[in-house]
Amino acid sequence: MLASSETVVALPADVALHARPAAQFVRTAVGFSADIAIAVNGRQADAKSLLAVLALGAEGGTELRLTASGEDAPRALDALRDCIAAFS
C-alpha cells in the first residue's frame, strides 16, 4: 500500500510563488517519485509542472495545501515545507 500524506503551509508574507520560487519548488518536487499536488484557494495543480504551479498565482501569505502519495510521500512533503520556509 502506498503512503499518502497532506500538509498545509503558508507562503512567507513577502514572497509570491512567481518564477524563481516556483522553479525551486518544482525542482524539489521532481526529486521524488511520489505524486505531488499543490492546491491554492480551491485550485489544484501538479507540483512537478512549473507552468501549472505558476498558473495558481499564489501570493505572499497564501496557504498552500500539499498532498503526496507514494513511497517517499512524507519525505517529499518535508522537503517541500523546508523549500517554502527557505523563501523568507
Image (cartoon, rainbow, N blue to C red):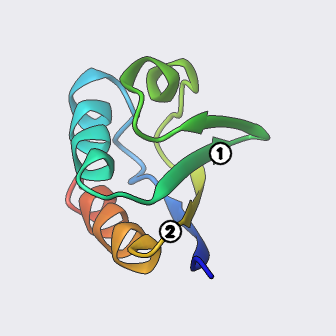
Label 2 residue SS: loop
Name the spot of residue 56 as percent of width and height, x first.
Answer: 58, 26
The residue lying at 50 percent from left, 68 percent from top is: 70
Decide which of tag 2 and tag 1 comes sooner along the chain. 1
Mark 1 Cα shell of 10 Å, populated few (<14), some (14-19), many (≥20): some
Q: Which mark is residue 70?
A: 2
Q: Amino acid at mark 2?
A: Gly
List the residue tagged with mark 1.
Answer: 39
Asked which quadrant contains residue 7, the reply is bottom right
Eye-nearest disc, 2 or 1: 2
Is residue 6 shown left or right of residue 80?
A: right
| Location of the N terminus (image quadrant) | bottom right
Is residue 65 shown left or right of residue 41?
A: left
Is residue 17 shown left or right of residue 27?
A: right
The residue lying at 53 percent from left, 33 percent from top is: 58
Name the spot of residue 24 as percent of width and height, x first.
Answer: 21, 40
Vertical position of residue 1 compared to residue 51: above or below? below
What distance separates the C-alpha of mark 2 from that of mark 1? 18 Å
Q: Which residue occupies the foreground of this view, 14 or 50?
A: 50
Asked which quadrant contains residue 74, the reply is bottom left
